[in-house]
Image: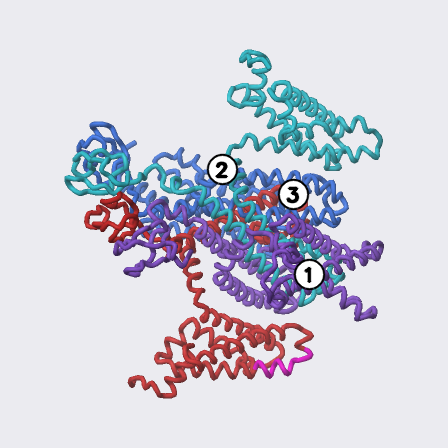
Chain colours: A cyan, B blue, C red, D purple
């Protein structure tokens, strides 16, 4: 590959599409963000029956305009990037592709029966919103914090699952099919709904024993909801560390004493005593 | 503007209305607080049909008495304050105005059709309760803690929203309109209801796949509820723990600069510059 | 009052009733605890219709036996204590009295109409369970932790209330009486149900705008649920402090250096170098 | 018992069944895990009526295959282990037995009436999933963290129970049987459902006073949900933060004692006693 020519159109397009430091690059990102949001709103509106009936053609036209824009953007991303393969098979490359393709597939596969399936595929375009996270710097910290405490949270969730299976099975035996606990999977589902304190109420125990067990499950859920929170909380406190707590108004002081007045706790970089002005001799300081 | 005469009626009235240090000022604040609460209770009672029918005239009369009191108070606030414009366009100035005006508007705009709309406007008077926060000192700390962790919480809520949109769309495809998932916006609404562990149960999945996905969403919600809590918790620990974390090896430094070498961040009790040994003059310290 | 005779029956009875250090005193406390629990179960069972119909006489008899036992216990407590008035008007003195009296009142006030009211009074005996907390030492720590963070939690709950009133009023205007939002108080109740993530679902928004506002309220609730947790969490971490974290396997080390080998970080009470065995001279240690 | 022959089939089988360090041992554990999961899925599917009707014979056959496999595994575990009694009466020994036996019992006890009860017994095989926790190392930490904060959480849950009983009784008196509060136990159940923020909605207050009390209970629940979280959070921070809190001014000390003066708590790398200068012999250290 030739050395990058900083004035070539490919280099400038790359700067606009992939970076947000130049005015044009920033503008592109903002416009893209707006179009992504618009596209999500369109998909949502289309699913509302009366809106779809009334404005079907307008929505369909907008869908196509956005899809073509995304197609151009996708091609531009491939052309301008140095290693197209790396982009195409990267997380965002796949998402970009998946958010472009559905409408084209709906063209090839005709017939009323398939149209519905295509509509479902089009809904995958919702993945495009994931692009937004690119622009938020803070999110990396969050992801890191979640990653750090992931093994603990996973073990915890696994414990929740075991409790759900056992308690769900017990509830199925106790309550029976009359109360809505029609099978063990449904009972386990109810148990997860209860343990996570969601509590839809579509299924609810009616027998005294069932209600007693349900109360136990809830109190247990109340007790263990503390665990993941405690984990993440401690993880966060750990990451923050001493420096954040101290802030810029505090400096570390050492134990060297002034040979003139004996004053202690000087700044680590102090050259003169803060009390009497005598010159300090940090080289004598054993803590160095 | 003339120099403030400490014995003028305007000065004394200002002291009563805006401050709570004198006995009269304190009494005024307590009475105002009671009337605000009473006014909220009145608005609430009026919305209860059978109370409105039975006691309409009494409620209407009380409404007017309170509105007139608030009008007088609002005018008094404008007259007594030095810079009326600053007050009028301040947060509380606007709230004070909004909580006074609705009943007057209901006078001008007559007709049964408009009356209902006016009633809605009158409900805005509920904003008056926001005045109460003025009197609670502790609230500032809370607001600060929330502000400090706001960017993190916002990113987190954004992540919740993305999850809701994707999961909501999937639920719409899986469950269909029979289960109440009539459109993607409604599905997303259901997803937020579930992720936040509220779980109304007005919409609930009935298909096995839908219930499985719902269980995943709930467990996910259970896992990520830990994140905002962890953030605020760490933020609080940070604000609180300063002294504990510092220990005896750290001292507070101030912003005074040495007049000889310009070095900053001296110990609060420093008499000589730690860099050049020049005598410091804390009385000149701008931070005073 | 005469000097306490350690062998008098009153002294011994006081020891049994008020203390749990002697075998008899411990036995008394355990029996009392069991009877309190039994009494609560009896009150509960009595409220279940079919149990009350079938076993009314047995339950009634047991009620009287327990009431007489509690009466004797209450009189014994008054007789044996040195300052009866202090006991009678203490928190537990009042609870002991309230848990004894209801059944007697039901004797004096006859008539089917009053019987129901008396039953309600009898339910107050449930307060007796509060006695149990006496025996749990750990509870004091919990109460202290809650007390320390009470002002912050109160301010927070107040903020929750203001949000509920404003959002409840908005929901009343948006949803109207068809969706169950029949009045502002009911709307505020629904708003508290939603903000606290309880979500009964007896009232639920049906209009798109109402569902959108409900989603906002939920996400807000999700965000602010972190606040009280963060407060208590930080309060707890604070109380634990350094010593708990360190444990007995860690000691503080200072910065003095051995004059022979120069090894640092000796224990504060070290007399000899841990590396070379040379005698240390702590008196030269500036950190002393 | 003879000295263990490292090449005997029993020793090798023990290595495969009980350990996961050799390739065969690892394979066995993975296969066992898969079969346990399969068996749970089978039990679940069997409880779904239409699946049971359609595939009864296949499910029944698979059940037997798995049961026989588990029986062989159980016998192998007893044969290969050195102290069979310790295994049999250990936690996992009992679970292994309970997850093997139900299907055999269903053979002996015939008759349609008993078949249903047996099905319930078979559901106990769900306990087998508990085996999975063996393979997750992280879980021990979680269990430790929960154990450490158990007394505090228990006291807290006890407080929740007292509140539930008192508030439940009050709700029973206020709401009455029309709203679903048919007895005090049911009211207490509702109160736990509400306090834990589950909120099924199968029972919900309808009277203004009942809704007001419910709102109070919810806000209380919102406030106290912070307590267990705070406890676990602090406990975690404590366990985790040791190194961070210690900093460089603290070193770990061990339990070895000086043979000359008996002084303990020497630095881990100490060669001489810090008290008397005697040479230390870490190789004699009992903590090794």
**Secondary structure state at the residue bearing disc 2:** helix
Q: Position of residue A233 (x, y in %)?
A: 48, 47
Vertical arrangement, residue A212 with respect to residue C100, above or below = above
Tell me if I can see residue C65 in this picture: yes
Identify residue for label 1. D76
Q: Which residue is mark 3?
A: B189
Mark-to-mark CA distance, 2 and 1: 58 Å
> In the image, is A48 to the left or to the right of A222?
right
Left or right: A230 as drawn, with respect to A178:
left
For mark 1, name the chain: D
Q: Is residue D86 left or right of residue D41?
A: left
**Foreground of the two, C153 or C144:** C144
**Chain letter belonging to callout 2:** B
How crowded pointer 3 is (Cα within 10 Å; few <14, some 14-19, many 20+) is rated as many
Q: What is the magenta range?
A: C53-63
At which x and y percent is residue A221? 58, 57
Q: Residue at x 57, y 38 (%)?
A: B158
The image's mark for residue B151 is 2
Who's the residue at 64% across and 64% down the image?
D93
């Amino acid at each position: 590959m030739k050395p990058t020519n900083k004035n070539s159109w490919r280099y400038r397009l790359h700067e606009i599409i992939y970076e947000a430091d130049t005015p044009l690059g920033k503008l592109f990102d903002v416009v893209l963000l707006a179009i992504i949001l618009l596209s999500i709103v369109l998909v949502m509106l289309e699913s509302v029956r009366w809106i779809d009936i009334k404005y079907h053609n307008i929505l369909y036209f907008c869908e196509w305009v956005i899809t073509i824009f995304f197609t151009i953007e996708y091609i531009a991303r491939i052309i301008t990037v140095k290693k197209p393969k790396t982009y195409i098979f990267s997380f965002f490359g796949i998402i970009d592709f998946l958010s472009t393709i559905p409408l084209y597939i709906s063209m090839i596969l005709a017939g009323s029966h398939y149209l519905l399936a295509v509509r479902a595929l089009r809904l995958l375009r919702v993945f495009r919103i994931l692009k937004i996270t690119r622009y938020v710097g803070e999110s990396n910290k969050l992801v890191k914090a979640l990653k750090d405490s992931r093994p603990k949270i996973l073990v915890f969730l696994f414990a929740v699952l075991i409790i759900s299976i056992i308690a769900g099975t017990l509830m199925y035996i106790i309550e029976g099919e009359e109360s809505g606990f029609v099978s063990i999977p449904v009972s386990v589902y109810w148990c997860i709904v209860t343990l996570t304190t969601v509590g839809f109420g579509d299924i609810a125990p009616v027998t005294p024993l069932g209600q007693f067990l349900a109360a136990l499950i809830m109190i247990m859920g109340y007790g263990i909801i503390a665990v993941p929170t405690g984990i993440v909380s401690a993880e966060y406190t750990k990451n923050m560390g001493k420096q954040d707590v101290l802030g810029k108004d505090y400096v570390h002081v050492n134990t060297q004493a002034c040979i003139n007045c004996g004053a202690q706790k000087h700044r680590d970089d102090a050259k003169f005593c803060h009390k009497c002005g005598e010159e300090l001799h940090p080289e004598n300081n054993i803590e160095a």
